[in-house]
Image: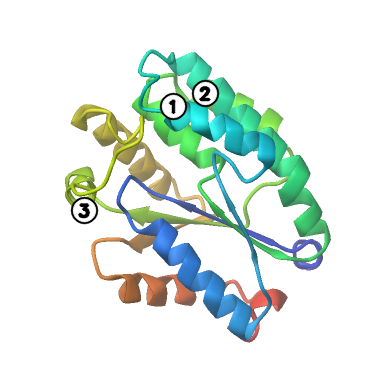
């Protein structure tokens, strides 16, 4: 535990579309900045200059012909850059890192949603992430039909435009993570208002009893 505390804290946020995780991350970042220390906020795909360029390709609705294998490799490429350019240096400096999606997103979206398989995605994730494994992953779970209803009035990117069956497979993959028994995964019920999600997340973070979170 002392080694994990020395190297900082990596918390990742996962969930289907419309689950409110981005709002949750911003709220937690404000709370941490006020009570503990300003965290580093990152997102996937993206988070670096190269990653943001890759993100533009991945989410471009005018590229519907992008193949599943290409999508996965681009996701992993963005992730590899993010880990080495941003995540590992921040952890070495003892910082809190909050990342909006991470390696588990590829397990859900490309492994489950695209049907490429968990084992194939896991092998590529291991190569991209290396030692930068999350200390905690908050799974913001919301049935796809509710998430899609929340997003009805916004412009959809390439992944958000996928059909209901795709998003059901993504959600099923996240449910599998929640049911896996891995203590890294903690569930946040995303069906309620943002304030309730925030209280759930704060309780989970406090339970870590991490030095960087002592004043939370």
Q: Residue at x 61, y 85 (%)?
A: 35
Determine crowd level at label 1: few under 14, some 14-19, many 20+ residues with C-alpha closer than 10 A: many
**Nearest to the observer: residue 199 or residue 152:** 152
Q: Residue at x 76, y 67 (%)?
A: 5
**Residue 189, x across and y down, in percent:** 31, 62
Q: Callout 2: helix, strand or loop?
A: helix
The label shown at residue 110 is: 1
The label shown at residue 72 is: 2
Distance from label 2 to label 3 (Cα)?
27 Å
Q: Nearest to the eye among marks 2 and 3: give it.
A: 3
Q: State whether residue 62 is above or below residue 210.
A: above
Q: In which quarter of the image is residue 44?
A: top right
Q: Quadrant of residue 216?
A: bottom right
Q: State whether residue 176 is above or below residue 65.
A: below
The label shown at residue 137 is: none
Whether residues under marks 1 and 2 lie with C-beta atoms below 8 angstroms apart, the answer is yes
Q: Which of marks 3 and 1 is nearer the N terminus?
A: 1
Residue position marked by numbered label 3 in the rendering:
150
Whether residues under marks 3 and 1 lie with C-beta atoms below 8 angstroms apart, the answer is no
Q: Residue at x 24, y 49 (%)?
A: 151
Total tally of numbered discs in the picture:
3
Q: Callout 3: helix, strand or loop?
A: helix
């Amino acid at each position: 535990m002392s080694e994990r505390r020395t190297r900082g804290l990596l918390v990742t946020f996962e969930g289907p579309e419309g689950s409110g995780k981005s709002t949750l991350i911003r709220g937690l970042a404000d709370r941490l900045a006020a009570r503990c220390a300003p965290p580093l906020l990152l997102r996937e795909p993206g988070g670096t200059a190269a990653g943001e360029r890759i993100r533009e390709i991945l989410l471009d609705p005018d590229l519907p012909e992008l193949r599943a294998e290409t999508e996965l490799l681009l996701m992993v490429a963005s992730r590899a850059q993010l880990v080495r350019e941003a995540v590992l240096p921040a952890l070495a400096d003892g910082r809190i890192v909050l990342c909006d999606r991470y390696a588990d997103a590829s397990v859900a979206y490309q492994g489950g949603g695209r049907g490429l398989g968990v084992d194939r995605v896991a092998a590529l994730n291991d190569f991209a992430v290396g030692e930068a494994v999350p200390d905690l992953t908050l799974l913001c779970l919301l049935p796809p039909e509710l998430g899609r209803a929340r997003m009805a009035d916004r412009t959809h990117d390439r992944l958000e435009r996928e059909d209901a069956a795709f998003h059901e497979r993504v959600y099923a993959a996240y449910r599998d993570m929640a049911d896996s028994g891995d203590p890294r995964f903690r569930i946040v019920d995303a069906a309620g208002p943002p304030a309730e999600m925030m209280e759930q997340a704060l309780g989970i973070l406090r339970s870590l009893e991490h030095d960087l979170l002592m004043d939370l």
